[in-house]
Amino acid sequence: MFVDRFPAGRTVMTTPAPQQVLRQLGEQGYVILENVLSPTVVDRLRQVVDDRMHRERVAPFVPTEAPEAVGDDQLESYLSESYTVSREELTRLLQRIRHTRAANHGTPWPVEPERVNKCFLHLPTLFDQDRSQRIWNLLTKGEEIADLVEHPEVLEIVRKVLGEDCILSDVSATSIGSGTDGGAWHVDVPLGQLPEPLPDFPLTTQNAWMLDDFTAENGATRIVPGSHLSRKKPTWSGGEMDGEVTLCGPAGSVAVWLSNTWHRSGPNTTDQPRRAILCYYCRSWVQPFTDYTQDLTAEQAAELSPTVRYLAGFGSRGLRRG
């Protein structure tokens, strides 16, 4: 666990009052809280993420039981056009999708791949032609991560936006590699599958915990302030956007944005990666991106606080009835 679990005496240099945060979120669609985590905590989290990324890059999950099915060519085309992945990663991604489909009795989706809810799709772990990396299911891979999920200052804000009964949709880590061009503009799951006009209230919030300084040069997230009020989705493409801002902050800060705010990862022109942990929350009636009740072992779940267990789906999922 953390050496100092968010000590009460830590320095929070520019954290505004909750009312200011909520006003900023409502008007601009994002906010940055600086220096929320101590350097000791950041160092430990960086070590956890680096170690796990090394392990998964050396030995990625490649299931063997992955039978092909009609429509896989269309699925492959969609994935290769949507994500900048290597041929090797695309092959692994298809294997994971086929493996999960087989575990679900070979059940096909009733819609074409681009209309499939992203909650039902495996997404790349290596992207930007293997220069950038993502860790999925991070809550099961490091006991320190639970502390971020229930961080009191940030969880208070999330609950005021999404409701006191909100739940955890996903926890992941990202490393935006050196010399990468940045991601595509988007809104977050599930809004990409909804028709316009989008809901006039947020369904989810993303919290990006900065493990490195976020700068304009190293791939810090780009945001279009106020775009959440348009009730529209951006075109899935990269490049600069009129009015965009860069979410800059020192390591240990957290950037919070609403799911309907247009955003993307920026280009990294430095010689170092830009790393972050993403804690993604949703309203209690929105399907989460990851089902932690299936992925956490009984021993892991028992070690979590009641707050994190609820957020992870224990007591907040559909029931076995009858």
Image: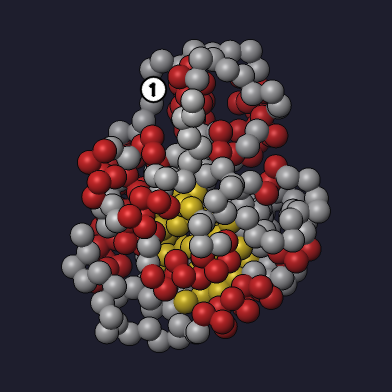
User: For this view, does 8 lie left or right of residue 321?
Assistant: left
Pointer 1: what residue?
Answer: 63
Quarter assignment of residue 84:
top right
Q: Position of residue 55 (x, y in %)?
A: 28, 41
**Would you say residue 11 is visible in this rendering?**
yes
Q: Point out the residue furthest to the right here.
A: 197
Residue in the foreground of this view, choosing between 29 and 79: 29
In this view, which residue lies farthest toward the left?
3
Q: Is residue 261 above or below residue 99?
A: below
Residue at image coords 63%, 13%: 70
Residue 41 position within the rendered picture, expressed as x and y whole percent measured from the top left:
27, 68
Q: How many marks?
A: 1
- Residue 54 percent coordinates (x, y): 29, 45
Residue drawn at 66 percent across, 29 percent down: 113
Q: Quadrant of residue 155?
A: bottom left
Residue 308, compared with residue 253, is above or below; it is above
Which part of the image, by quadrant, shows the N terminus? Answer: bottom left
Identified at 55% across, 33% down, the residue is 121
Is residue 81 left or right of 283 when viewed as pictured?
right
Which residue type carries mark 1? Answer: Pro
Q: Quick check: 75 left or right of 54?
A: right
- Left or right: where does residue 270 sit relative to residue 299? right
Q: Position of residue 160 (x, y in %)?
A: 55, 69
